[in-house]
Image: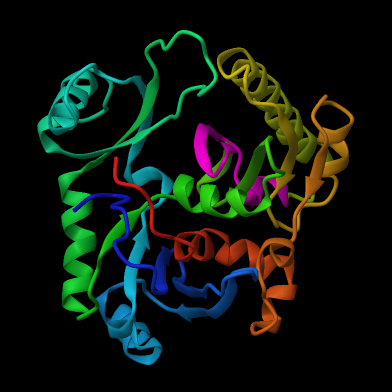
Amino acid sequence: MRFFKKAKKTESWLSFAMLADGIAAASISRIPGSRPAVDTCVFYAGHPGADLLEKAGRELGAASYHCTTILSGGEYQMLAVEAPNVPVEELKTAVRWRLKDMLDFHVDDATIDVLDIPVDKNAAVRTSHGMFAVAARNSVIETRQGMFAAAKVGLSVIDIPEMAQRNISGLMEPEGRGLAMLSFGADGGLLTVTFNGELYLSRRIDVTLEQLLDADHDRKHASFDKITLELQRSLDHFDRQFHFISVSRLLLAPSGVTGLEEYLSSNLYTPVQTMDLGEALDISRIPELLDKAVQQRFFFTIGAALRHEETQL
């Protein structure tokens, strides 16, 4: 199974995220000319296993959807590599060879997928370009597939948070400019930069949402400092590597963290704003999503449900 296998249809997706205390599920509907609408946004408390998934799938009518699930941050590795100069049919084999000394487990035990990083279309000279390689242990993929099989929920795609965040970021981009987005959860921070709906940069930041909600002022601001330094380094690196993309702003995903927007605004050249999912999506059918804490809980789940038909690599 591919991680982000391209959809062949444009019908709604139902996404499932396995959280520490339960399962989050979301679905989106698309109406031409309107913002995508959140149709389903439900949390099932309990052990995130096959029994709870079966209940969720039955109650949500999973059989009528394409279904996707999201891996957590510790279940895969995402690496930027130079695209091998080989035919498309040989691409994954070539990337697998390049990853053999980069993974923290044996490459023979890995399920691998790739995502192209588009080049500057206006460049006079076409040089080599990069791509993202995503690798997960076969055992992780098999366990997740087995859970869905046991729950009698058909699984079409296994996705990752970077792609879910890209889907939301793509809805917020100003025309002709890139957008940086930063989210926080139990796995830490995730910084992405998108342009024309494509993912160009992904960085993990070792600061969790729990640390940012710490009541201790000194510990909280130490985390702010760490985030600021990582953002400065990452955005400077991005500007050097992708000089043809102008980043319009940094959007902070909903989190309930106080003071971070102001702190980053005073320490970064890039404008900083806190986003509301209601800016990108029609959330009128789910009143609970007016709460920023609820938006944070469902952020990646909703992002994964935003899958849309794409061009095959």
Q: At which x and y percent is residue 166?
A: 53, 47
**Magenta highlight range:** 194-213
Quick check: 41 left or right of 61? right
Quick check: 10 left or right of 244? left
Q: Residue at x 13, y 28 (%)?
A: 90
Picture quarter containing residue 284? bottom right
The figure's colour scheme reads: rainbow
Outermost bottom residue = 59
Q: Quadrant of the C terminus?
A: top left
Q: Residue at x 75, y 54 (%)?
A: 275
Please indicate, yes or no, whether residue 206 appears anywhere in the rendered image.
yes
Specify whether residue 198 is painted magenta.
yes
Q: Nearer the viewer, residue 14 or 70?
A: 14
Q: Residue at x 58, y 19 (%)?
A: 242
Picture quarter containing residue 297? bottom right
Depicted 117 relative to depicted 34: above or below? above
Q: At which x and y percent is residue 174?
A: 72, 44
Q: At which x and y percent is residue 58?
A: 32, 90
Q: Nearer the viewer, residue 227 or 158?
A: 158
Quick check: 74 left or right of 271? left
Depicted 196 relative to depicted 49: above or below? above
Depicted 171 relative to depicted 283: above or below? above
Number of labels in the image equals 0
Depicted 20 relative to depicted 222: above or below? below
Picture quarter containing residue 154? bottom left
Quick check: 141 left or right of 43? left
Q: Residue at x 45, y 29 (%)?
A: 118
Q: Nearer the viewer, residue 242 or 140?
A: 242
Outermost left residue = 108
Please indicate, yes or no, whether residue 260 appears anywhere in the rendered image.
no
Q: At which x and y percent is residue 232?
A: 70, 21
Specify whether residue 282 is painted magenta.
no
